[in-house]
Amino acid sequence: LPSGFVSVSRLSLVVVQSAQMQPDTHVYMFVCCVQVQDYLEPFRLSLEKLQEVSARATPDGTGSNWRRHIWGHENFLALDLGGTNFRVLHVRVVEEEQKMLKMDSQICAIPQEMMLGTGEQLFDHIAACLGDFLVSQDLKGHTLPLGFTFSFPCEQKEIDKSILIRWTKGFKCSGVEGEDVVKLLKEAIQRRGDYDIGSVAMVNDTVGTMMSCGYRDQSCEIGMIIGTGTNACYMEEMKNVKRVEGEAGRMCINTEWGGFGDDGSLRDILTEFDVVVDETSINPGVHTFEKMISGMYLGEIVRLVLVRLAKEKLLFKGQTSKDLLTPNTFQTKFISEIEDGLENAQNILTKLGLKWDDVDSRVVRLVCDTISSRSARLCAAALATLANRIRVNRGLDHLKTTVGVDGTVYRKHPNFSKELQATVRLLAPKCDITFLVSEDGSGKGAAMVTAVAQQHVCCCSSLFLLAAHKTTLNLHLTTCCVSMLH
Ligand code: BGC
């Protein structure tokens, strides 16, 4: 083998895997892979580059004691809207001593047309699903408090007042941006008139995840989602939160890190394929970081690279297929499956109507590996920023903390979590981070926030205000939509 070949680590992996091949196949692979390499190189971010990205992602400063607050109430409802499905939950406190929460839930699909329809249709559908669920749980006639996980960038004015800044993740319902989504939900329920809900607490899914993981591990102070979209929240010192008066305690900040790079600060690492993904999305120009990382976009980036490699005759003998040429046909879950085994890669390529040979399937796996690896490393860069910030804020030489995580990309991809964790260790060497995968999703966390809000709603109209009024509560739960960039 030519010596240059083995010096490129990822390509050498391909060589090792194909050691039983004929020598001429090796030569063909060498030539082909070196050219493929030209296309994949821009996705490979060095540690130095990630350190730079991490340094650019500086939050602008913008509780664990909740356990004891939640036991006064027994039944809560939760709604979880953030992707193509939404979940309705009934959360119950069943064993006070053991602090057991029990949940029943139902998933309702949101048809594609509805994601692009009117806000009224969307909220009527949510209200209808909640109504059906109440019937199935024999809860009709009970007015229960409701935790609403609404996982889109919002300006949270109060615990039950949250203005949608913009839709993400393929949603574009008219008449919702700029409006209070809690009000829209309540109006939809009133239009039906057959049931009512109690007080509402709205949270982002990152906050719900942090809360539900915090139930198992009280040192959980970061919540991170890497699924259809991506985002993280963390506990910030009140003295650094400029928007709210008061210095004592901590407040949960929703970073909305998906919007990192919208000011052009990631331009140097965007590839030509990222640019196409952005331009053909329904929200061009925004959520740049999310489009390089999350499940909604990874499959499409891979598809665009494969089309280009085929057109350059570096794959499939220069042939494509109707499916490969159709946007969004290469699902993000294919990436996980392909990286899991070569046989999966071959089955998927066949399903996509492609004529492949052994080298093709290995190159496709290399493409998937490169793109998912970039995603994991970029997430690590942003997470390292948060962990380092918490450490420095507290004047600690060493921080031990826990990140509550959820999302299909993190959960389902075979190497993603390992790569992310290894990179965070390099970028935040003074932080000892435990990763806790959320068991129950963010809905349970939303119900917990509702429970805490319920306890204190009588003395102050919202937890947001509690924070502002410097009460002695340890928990100041609210989410300020603070871009990591400003
Ligand atoms: C939204 C965030 C959300 C994330 C994960 C992003 O598109 O802007 O609010 O937390 O997706 O669901």
Image (tube, grey):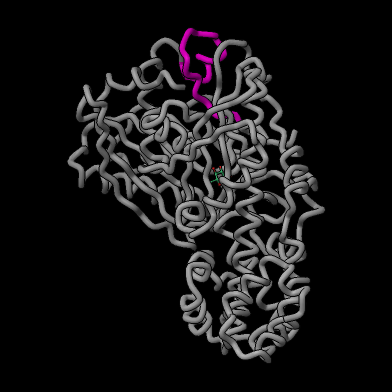
Q: Position of residue 338 (x, y in %)?
A: 51, 71
Q: Position of residue 360 (x, y in %)?
A: 61, 82
Residue closer to the observer: 412 or 73: 412
Asked whether residue 410 is in view, the answer is yes
Seen in the image, is 20 located left or right of residue 450? right
The boundaries of the magenta stretch are: 461-481
Q: Where ligand 1 lies, by image quadrant?
A: top right
Q: Position of residue 471 (x, y in %)?
A: 50, 8
Q: Is residue 281 above or below residue 406?
A: below
Q: Is residue 481 above or below residue 167?
A: above
Kindly identify the residue that appears in the image at 54 percent across and 9 percent down: 469
Kindly identify the residue that appears in the image at 52 percent across and 57 percent down: 415
Q: Quadrant of the N terminus?
A: bottom right
Q: Is residue 48 magenta?
A: no
Q: Is residue 227 above or below residue 212?
A: below
Q: Which residue extends farthest left? A: 138
Q: Quadrant of residue 442?
A: top left
Kindly identify the residue that appears in the image at 41 percent across and 35 percent down: 213
Kindly identify the residue that appears in the image at 48 percent across and 67 percent down: 340
Q: How many numbered discs sit on the rendered protein?
A: 0
Q: Quadrant of residue 365?
A: bottom right
Seen in the image, is 175 located left or right of residue 440? right
